[in-house]
Image (tube, coloured by chain):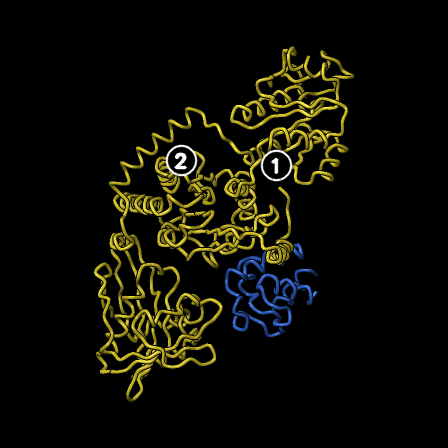
Chain colours: A blue, B yellow
């Protein structure tokens, strides 16, 4: 799953997949702005058939949190 | 319409882009202007145009700069304008209801002026798609019109009366009704980043406007070639006989074909070539066309007929030759899998439509396809309306439109309020350093405690500006941090929120910054431009303000200015006040 999420992030942020690390966040990836963040949320929702409310969506602003939240939603 | 996942869409768009780059296909310049954030439209448009074999480069204008950008984008091949009523002014979707009558009248007048100015700037653009205003996302009462709806109606009427001929008016409400407001609007985008429309909205929108693009790029359909049995009427003439086929409201399935024939007759009268290709005895078909009382399509509508036992692909090719039209301008409708797949396989340029198995969907399918046809003959009524609009337009534009951007800016009654070293704005100032990307010269992110230290430190000046106009207050939207050294001062940070750009505020802001330094006795100023992926628009900002390049190092440029060499802009239409 982690690789797939990295792939989604790379496509949405229009960057190389190896630019994404465990510490990735809007501070380390300049293309990760609030709009592309929402685009990523939409992509994740489609991919895993889940839904994030707005607080959750706001909260997902780093790679680790994203993995944790999706795992939680899927169990 | 077909649904593709967002991620697959992005990947496919990248693939198409590479394909186009290698094929040297002409790049079409397409612009999108809006007063809300719509940048996600770029990839989506490039995808949907790409799968229609149009190589496009989409450029999205600056946030809320529709009027200002309409000059810059006037040379686009196609320009889409999504002027969103909800953001006519900050928070307008909910503030409209409380607005007093006079302010409202004033705002409507102002907006009409803006619209006319946009029309004037764009009247020679090759094609403009203008989205009509709609208040549908804002859930209004079904029995009482909200103020927002009333304004939409008034502005839409104004647009209809004044839009130049190169404008296509896109009915946004119809898009909402197709996919529902629930799917077209994502409120998280709205509250998080001033973007209203969902990915689904843009996908639907792009697909609906593709025919307009095709028209501009000469890819329209000119001819409709039809099979007869079970395509123009229900039944098979060779088996069911003259009295057995149905195409009238006497039966339910006949009624569907009555509707189909009516649609075809309508487009035939608008100049579309109608042809028949059918495997039948020619006498049988002629007999139906000439003598069947339920036939709506007649020999005046049918330009060409190939009724024989030859391969249909052969007949279609003959038709193309005889009429001297390209295969790519032909649409072919048939009910048979075999014929459809044959034509698809052998003549891929011909667009095929198969009569759906669920027959009740047939008229809708055909109607949805109609925008792809090149409509030549306008009705007399259409023509009269155009003339009427044009006269109206002339009369009104003399009275209303702004002649220059300055005139427009003047009408806004802009006021900048300057706050220097103000403690109460520390959180907002820190937030701005963290969030602002586009108009940000150095993009240094500061925490609240760092900003607090700068405010307290006499070696620094922290200047925040508040921007308002006669319709509302944008709040604290600009920030400069100046550091004083022994014999010079450095502009450490200079940024402005994108919602105030395009109003020449950056010119007045520089006046303010220089003035502050002058008062402190500064003689020499240095400043930096540090490029990021987002701040390219500020690249020449210091040069435009009279600074000289001192040094270029690792992409970053250092500038210098002797303060006495600065010439103040002193813009008359921006009032500067000092706050406490």
Taking the image as shown, residue B157 lies to the left or right of residue B219, namely left
Q: Going by the image, does A8 lie left or right of B70? A: right
Q: Is residue A44 above or below residue B211?
A: below
Badge number at residue B419: none
Q: Secondary structure at mark 2?
A: loop
- Between marks 1 and 2 in the image, the one whose residue lies nearer the viewer: 1
Q: Note whether B296 is above or below B275 in the view shown.
A: above
Residue B84, horizontal then vertical, whole percent: 42, 48
- For the residues labelled 1 and 2, the Cα–Cα distance comes to 53 Å
Q: Is B4 placed above or below B279 here?
A: below
Residue A16, horizontal then vertical, whole percent: 62, 68
Count of labels in the image: 2
Residue receiving disc 1: B326
- Chain of the residue where label 1 is placed in the rendered structure: B
Residue A35, percent from left and from top: 51, 60
> Which residue, given by chain and number where applicable, does mark 2 sit on?
B144
Residue at left 56%, top 46%? B183
Residue at x 41% of width, y 77% of height: B557
Q: Nearer the viewer, residue B57 or B568?
A: B57
Q: Are marks 1 and 2 on the same chain?
A: yes
Q: Nearer the viewer, residue B176 or B515?
A: B515
Q: Along the horizontal axis of the image, is B192 left or right of A64? A: left
On the question of residue B218 being in view, the answer is yes
Label 1 crowd bin: few (<14), some (14–19), many (20+), radius 10 Å: some
Image side of residue B386 versus residue B470, left or right: right
Mark closest to the chain's N terminus, 1 or 2:
2
Question: Could you tell me which quadrant the N terminus of chain B lies in?
Answer: top right
């Amino acid at each position: 799953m982690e690789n797939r999420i990295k792939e989604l992030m790379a496509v949405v942020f229009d960057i190389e997949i190896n630019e994404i690390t465990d510490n990735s966040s809007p501070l380390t990836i300049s293309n990760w702005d609030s709009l592309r963040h929402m685009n990523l949320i939409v992509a994740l929702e489609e991919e895993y058939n889940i839904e994030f409310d707005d607080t959750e969506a706001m909260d997902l602003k780093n790679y680790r949190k994203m993995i944790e939240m999706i795992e939680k939603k899927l169990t | 319409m077909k649904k593709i996942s967002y991620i697959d869409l992005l990947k496919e768009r990248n693939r198409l882009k590479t394909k186009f780059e290698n094929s040297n296909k002409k790049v079409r310049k397409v612009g999108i202007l809006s007063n809300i954030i719509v940048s996600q439209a770029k990839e989506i448009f490039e995808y949907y145009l790409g799968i229609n074999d149009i190589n496009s480069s989409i450029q999205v204008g600056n946030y809320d700069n529709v009027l200002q950008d309409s000059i810059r984008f006037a040379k686009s091949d196609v320009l889409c304008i999504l002027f969103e009523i909800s953001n006519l002014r900050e928070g307008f979707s909910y503030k409209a209801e409380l607005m007093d009558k006079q302010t409202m009248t004033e705002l409507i007048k102002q907006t009409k002026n803006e619209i006319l100015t946009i029309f004037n700037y764009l009247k020679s653009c090759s094609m403009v798609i203008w989205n009509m205003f709609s208040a549908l996302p804002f859930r209004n009462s079904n029995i009482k019109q909200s103020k927002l709806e009333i304004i939409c109606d008034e502005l839409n009427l104004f647009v209809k009366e004044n839009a130049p001929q190169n404008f296509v008016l896109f009915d946004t409400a119809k898009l909402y009704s197709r996919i529902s407001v629930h799917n077209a609007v994502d409120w998280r985008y709205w509250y998080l980043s001033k973007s209203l429309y969902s990915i689904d909205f843009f996908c639907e929108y792009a697909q609906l406007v593709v025919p307009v693009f095709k028209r501009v790029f000469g890819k329209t359909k000119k001819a409709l070639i039809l099979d007869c049995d079970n395509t123009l009427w229900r039944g098979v003439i060779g088996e069911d006989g003259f009295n057995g086929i149905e195409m009238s409201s006497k039966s339910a399935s006949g009624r569907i074909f009555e509707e189909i024939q009516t649609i075809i007759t309508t487009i035939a009268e608008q100049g579309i070539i109608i042809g028949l290709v059918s495997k039948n005895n020619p006498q049988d078909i002629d007999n139906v066309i000439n003598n069947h009382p339920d036939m709506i399509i007649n020999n005046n509508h049918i330009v060409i007929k190939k009724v024989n036992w030859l391969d249909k692909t052969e007949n279609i090719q003959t038709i193309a030759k005889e009429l001297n039209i390209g295969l790519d301008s032909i649409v072919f409708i048939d009910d048979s899998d075999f014929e459809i797949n044959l034509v698809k396989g052998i003549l891929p340029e011909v667009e095929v439509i198969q009569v759906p198995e669920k027959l009740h969907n047939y008229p809708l399918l055909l109607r949805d396809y109609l925008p792809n046809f090149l409509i030549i003959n306008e009705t007399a009524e259409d023509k009269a309306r155009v003339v009427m609009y044009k006269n109206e337009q002339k009369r009104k534009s003399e009275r209303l439109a702004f002649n220059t951007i300055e005139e427009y800016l003047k009408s806004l009654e802009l006021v900048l309020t300057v706050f220097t070293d103000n403690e109460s704005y520390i959180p907002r100032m820190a937030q701005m350093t963290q969030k602002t990307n586009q108009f940000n010269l150095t993009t240094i992110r500061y925490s609240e405690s760092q900003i607090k230290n700068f405010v307290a430190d006499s070696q620094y000046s922290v200047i925040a500006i508040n921007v308002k106009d006669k319709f509302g207050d944008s709040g604290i939207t600009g920030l400069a941090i100046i550091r004083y050294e022994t014999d010079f001062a450095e502009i450490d940070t200079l940024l402005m929120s994108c919602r105030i750009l395009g109003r020449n505020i950056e010119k007045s802001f520089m006046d303010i910054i220089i003035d502050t330094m002058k008062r402190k006795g500064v003689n020499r100023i240095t400043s930096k431009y540090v490029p990021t992926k987002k701040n390219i628009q500020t690249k020449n900002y210091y040069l435009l303000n009279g600074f000289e390049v001192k040094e270029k190092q690792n992409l970053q440029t250092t500038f210098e200015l002797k303060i006495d060499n600065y010439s103040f802009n002193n813009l008359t239409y921006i009032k500067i006040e000092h706050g406490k």
